Image (cartoon, helix red, strand yellow):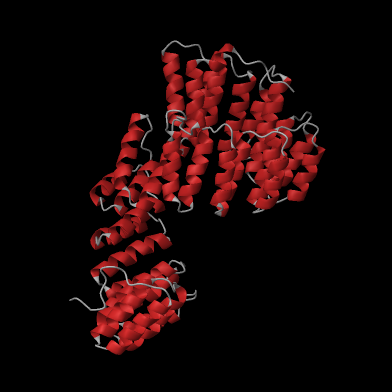
Amino acid sequence: MRAPPAAAGFNSPWTLAVRAAADQGRPRHAVALYLSSLRASHRPCPFALAAVLKSVPRLPAHAALPAAASLHAHLLRLGLLSHPYPHAALAHLYSRLLPPHHHAARDLLDGTPALRRHSLLVSSNSLLASRLRAGDIPAARALFDTMPARDVVSWNSMVAGLAKAGHLDEAIELFDQMTERNAASWNSLVCGFIAQGQLARARELFERMPIRNNVSWITMISGYAKAGDVQAAADLFERMESKDLYAWNAMIACYAQNGCAREALGIFNQMLKPHVWVLPNEKTFSSVISACSQLGDLRFGLWVESFMGSVGVELDDHLRTALVDLYTKSGRMDRAFDLFRGLRTRDLVSYSAMIVGCGMHGKLSEAVGLFKEMSDANINPNAVTFVGLLSAYSHAGLMEEARACFASMSTKYRIDPSVEHYTIMVDLLGRSGKLDEAFQLIMQMPMRPHASVWGALLLACRLHNNVELGEVVASKCFELEPKETGYYILLGNIYAQAKKWEKVKRLRKIMAERGLSKVPGSSWLHVA
């Protein structure tokens, strides 16, 4: 069924600006722009209103319902409630803000006089989407089966809902029954396969698509990103003929989330080149700042923060938290605290970033204070939080406090310690001279110890000149990382400290036989 023709206001500068703000997930900005258009005596545009209505659910919970009521009244005053686009957007809005079976959305659907059939269909689709969002597949299917009219949107919603819920066979059966398909129809099924971890089937369907839009490409790129297949995502990105902001964001995020920080910054620089020039948004900068944090590149991070201001991107809580992570890792704790204290809402991620930063830089009292603050706010810690807290105790050499903290992870917070937590504890025990306890802790690990854990103990063996244990630990390191010369040098220094020169010679011979060479500037002798 054809939608009503677009009015002239659809492409007006004000409407385009409002729609862009809504699409970028900036609800306050979308509302502010619409109000500015009214103050500028611009004629109210139903398309701009629809965009504003769609962005209202992104507002904070306490503001969303009052905003919905005000806009509802505004539509009534303007006589635009029967226009299909604002009407459908309002029905969609109420379905998001109210319980699935609340009477308000149904009343809006049934009680508005002189609604055209198109409006009825669009509103029915909104109710269908609401039930699918609530996860009530049986109710959604019942509504779908009894709808007096269905269009491609109805079919797409049902196929996507079934696929996302894991009912792939039913989704495929419905997809095969469709008499009209568009790119969104195929995308719905591709999304379903990806959601169920079936990337190969998703890719097969993607390659069969008779028509693809940017969503098709971005969906596959994001799927590969989540699976950690960076090369497959990059290959698809290179195949894209027309890359919009969302495609660039997907690829930058793919690199940043998979530890390819330099590649993330490289592709960010590409999108800013004059012959490409795509204006970044909040999501772009979030990934870029994450990449800067991974690299410890404070200089580029400072430029990014300045550049955000120059392109009009507001520093929201998400970006503030990303910058907190960057500044803590770069040692700029004063700036990190300023940003942290400026957050509207402090959550687990922001607290953990600060505690990790304090731990890294030996700020014990601040780390403990932040941990108490988040506990008082009923925010439960996670594994990252304890990396920071244990690091802080380790820096201060507080063994008993670290032991209690480590034990509380599993006993009080039901968090299984990771290799990183064990490494911190082994390092602290080792530096404190408790080498046997550190060794026993490693042997009790529920997972196979990484070279980092054994390396921490080997350093302690060198510090306390324990030859016997050092040999055992070094053999573990050689087994896990046979090409890493640092372990041989550490063992060589242990032998040299104990004046076991024959063993030093034998170790040098082994290194030569294995094609290893000593790192320039390193020594076999201990320097106090």
The image shows residue 328, relative to residue 317, as above or below, that is below
Is 436 positioned to the left or the right of 271 in the image?
left
Residue ID at (30%, 89%): 502
Relative to residue 207, is residue 331 drawn left or right?
left
The answer to whether residue 426 is visible is no
Please state if 466 lies on the left or on the right of 511 as rendered.
Answer: left
Q: Residue 481: x, y in percent?
A: 44, 72
**Quadrant of residue 484 within the rendered picture:** bottom left
Q: Nearer the viewer, residue 117 or 101?
A: 117
| Rendered view: 76 above or below 403 | above
Q: Residue 477 is drawn in which quadrant?
A: bottom left
Front residue of this view, candidates 54 and 138:
54
The percent coordinates of residue 328 (x first, y second) are 30, 52
The outermost residue toward the left is 528
Indicate the quadrant containing the C terminus: top left, top right, bottom left or bottom right: bottom left
In the picture, measured across the screen, residue 53 lies left or right of residue 525, that is right
- Residue 340, given in percent of the width and then of the height, sits at 31, 47
Q: For the N terminus, give its image quadrant.
A: top right
Q: Is residue 479 visible?
A: yes
**Which residue is found at the position 45% from the left and 47% from the top?**
263
Task: Indicate the position of residue 243 as horizontal and vertical percent values.
Answer: 54, 33
Q: Count numbered badges in the picture.
A: 0
Question: Is residue 195 or residue 268 the one in the foreground?
Answer: 268
